[in-house]
Image (tube, rainbow, N blue to C red):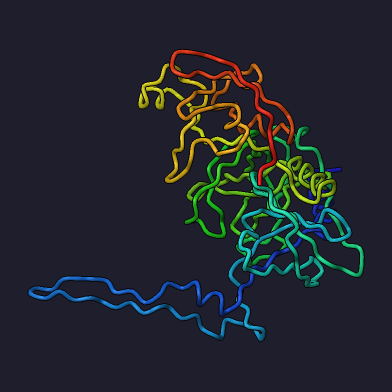
Amino acid sequence: MSQESSVIQAIKTVMPGVVSIVIEKSLTDLEKEMPPEMAIPFALPGKNQKLKMKPQKIPKELADAHGMVKVGGGSGFVVAKEGIVVTNKHVVADPKAEYIILGNDGRKFEATVLARDPIDDVAILKIQSNEPLATVALGDSLKIELGQSVLAIGNALGVFRNTVSSGIISGLSRSIRAATDIDPMTAPQELRGLIQTDAAINPGNSGGPLVNLVGEAIGINAAIVFGAQNLGFAIPVNAIKRDLADLATHGRIRRPLLGLRYLTLDEMLQNRLKLPVAEGAIILGHLPHAEAIIPGSPAYKAGLKEKDIIIECNSQKLSAERTIQDFLEEKEVGDTLELKVLRGKKQFVTKVVLTERK
């Protein structure tokens, strides 16, 4: 089969299981979220005055007959014929919003959010259907290779449904700090272990599948780099398979908690903080009002302290390429981590048993 024929067949296989997600909020809730009237001081010669800014009003014409306003859109894909849909967590992050699923055949469903992954940008939804739904098969992200041809499918810009773009896998195990395409002004989230692709991924594509030419999802489109071209990222599908298994077994997504905040060291941080090592992870509450060690957590119970430097995890050195988070991705709740720690000039080893992240 030619390359073109393989692409066409893969699209025909996958497309029936790809959905668009419409994000809606009530006009009343949106108006409550608008900033109140503000008075801004300004100066004129000989006068001190204030300019009053009135709160913005949302045109009622934007609301439908039920008083709902469309505020965004994303993509997703069906992974079980009973109506299980996966998408990005940031697409369905607003607990006050309603999420409408538009099937490839034009059918419309209301969606319930079953679970949101507390670490990876993955969410699982449920829709009700009287008929079995077309699904997208899940591949194995451990078997993908650089240069492999891939397709990205989704609801580009929240407007152009069923958009397909093609490219290759450009990189593996990438790490980025990404703002969501729903609200680029929100605090960025660190995403690790990503698949990099040059297949065009646009705002609104978030949550759609990245598929191989056999018609299997190998990733979930998650992020783009604004200002760059041909630089998109997808979460490996094995993370989705793990979350689905957790949901089926435990009724929720269970992710392990260590319970500390840290900075991964490099030479620049070593020089700035005057540290004895350039690799490892220094425990710091580097965010405003954030504790370095979460009280009652495994790290707390193990006696770890702020400014301790973790230099090894399970006898492997920590580095920018192999961080604490990378180790946690491979562990389950109840697993044990052995940490080698540098405190001042002394080294010691401690063991922590991972608990469930709430």
Residue 44 rendering spot, x and y as whole percentages: 13, 73
Give the quadrant of residue 164. Answer: bottom right
Left or right: 305, with 18 as reference point: left
Between 306 and 120, which is closer to the camera in this rendering?
A: 306
Q: Above or below — where is 156 with respect to 242?
A: below
The residue lying at 68 percent from left, 33 percent from top is: 354
The residue lying at 70 percent from left, 58 percent from top is: 154
Left or right: 228, with 63 as reference point: left
The residue lying at 69 percent from left, 59 percent from top is: 75
Task: Give the residue at the far top of this rendering.
Answer: 346
Q: Above or below — where is 28 with respect to 194?
A: below
Between 41 and 321, which is closer to the camera in this rendering?
A: 41
Residue 116 rendering spot, x and y as whole percentages: 69, 52
Residue 301 rendering spot, x and y as whole percentages: 60, 30
Left or right: 307, with 116 as reference point: left
Between 79 and 289, which is closer to the camera in this rendering?
A: 289
Residue 41 rendering spot, x and y as whole percentages: 23, 71
Give the quadrant of residue 335. Answer: top right
Task: Give the residue at the far right of this rendering.
Answer: 131
Between 16 and 5, which is closer to the camera in this rendering?
A: 16
The residue lying at 62 percent from left, 83 percent from top is: 67
Counting labels gives 0
Q: Quadrant of the N terminus?
A: top right
